[in-house]
Amino acid sequence: MKMKKIVVSSILCAALAATSITSFSAAQSKEDIESGITFDDFFYGYKVLAEENLPDNYVKFYTSGNRIDPTSGVEFTDLSTGQVVLSQYFNTSYGSVTQYLPSAAGYSADTKLNNSSGSINTNLNFTHTGGLYQKVRINLNKGSDYFTANGTYVKMTNNTPHEYNFTKEFNTGYTSSLIFYSGGAITAAQPDKNGYVEIYVSTNIGEPVYFTTDYCYSSPLVSSSGGGVTGQPFTGLTIGDANKNGYVDLVDAILIQKYANNAVTFDELALRCSDVNRDASTNLLDALKLQKFLIKLN
């Protein structure tokens, strides 16, 4: 009797698993498949698409999407001289642009949209940001509840709610931009209809990912910058951040130790963040390397 129960349970589990896979697969349309979105994307919420090395003192600008507003960009002021040294605008005619920004003092950065600007309230220094960068496809809502499930942001505009999709919207006066920062990588990103974006992020330990948004609308009667946010954390992509709260500390090292001892389980994003030494596995060596990093950091 026990044996029969086990067999029935096994069959039931297999049936449930098959049903689960079918329901996720059904979410994929022809457009999803053509754009490269897979079952794994829907299940895990992210996928690594490519890797690229970037030297110290360089910043790479990426345009991710075909309807990025060309008036959006970033203006850099050298903190040692107070001079504006670069105004880099995002344009869909190129995929990426690399610039040399060597000042050890760092730079203040202003986002720009429709000839307006706003500080991201963060000083950027590119002297030690070299290393391996990954191009990651991720659902916006996975990294921040600022975004809706389909990757938009709802804002009251002219007393009515409007879904900004971080593009120059066709046949309207609505424009918005979404810019991600991660070490030496800066990405202007447009989400697809499923809320996924493709951004470049650093694999250096403890390097945070954050974003800035800006909005503008215009009509025959009204023209306004509309607002936005600056320097907001985008969690789940920082190497060493096992609990995915946006920064690394001793709690993360302890959590990795627990995982290595089979005391806790990790989802796919946590496994990526916990592979501190980048050897495609998570074990006590990762916890040790993270502890050494934290000691040096303090």
Image (cartoon, rainbow, N blue to C red):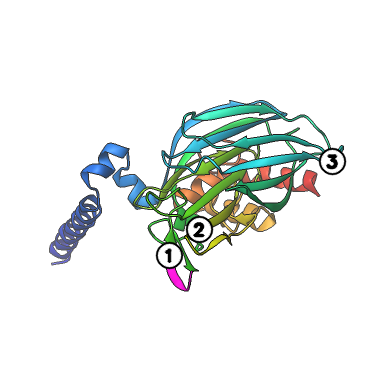
73 up-or-down from 14: above or below: above
> Residue tagged by mark 1?
162
Residue span colored magenta? 158-162
Residue displayed at 62% across by 40% down: 285
Q: Is residue 108 left or right of residue 195?
A: right
Give how far apart the Cα atoms at labels 2 and 3 are.
31 Å
Q: Is residue 38 left or right of residue 256?
A: left
The mark that comes first in sequence, 3 or 1, is 3
Q: Residues within 10 Å of mark 1 (few under 14, many from 20)?
A: some
Asked whether residue 254 appears in the rendered view, the answer is no
Residue 58 % position (x, y): 68, 29
> Residue tagged by mark 3?
82
Q: Looking at the rendered structure, which numbered label has been put on residue 217? A: 2
Give how far apart the Cα atoms at labels 3 and 1 are.
38 Å
Q: Nearer the viewer, residue 209 or 9?
A: 209
Give how far apart the Cα atoms at labels 2 and 1 are.
11 Å
The residue type indicated by label 1 comes to His
The mark that comes first in sequence, 2 or 3, is 3
Residue displayed at 64% across by 42% down: 74
Where, by quadrant of the figure, is residue 154 drawn? bottom left
Residue displayed at 51% across by 35% down: 91
Query: For residue 111: magenta?
Result: no
The residue type indicated by label 3 comes to Gly
19 up-or-down from 85: above or below: below
Q: Are marks 2 and 1 in contact (CB under 8 Å)?
A: yes
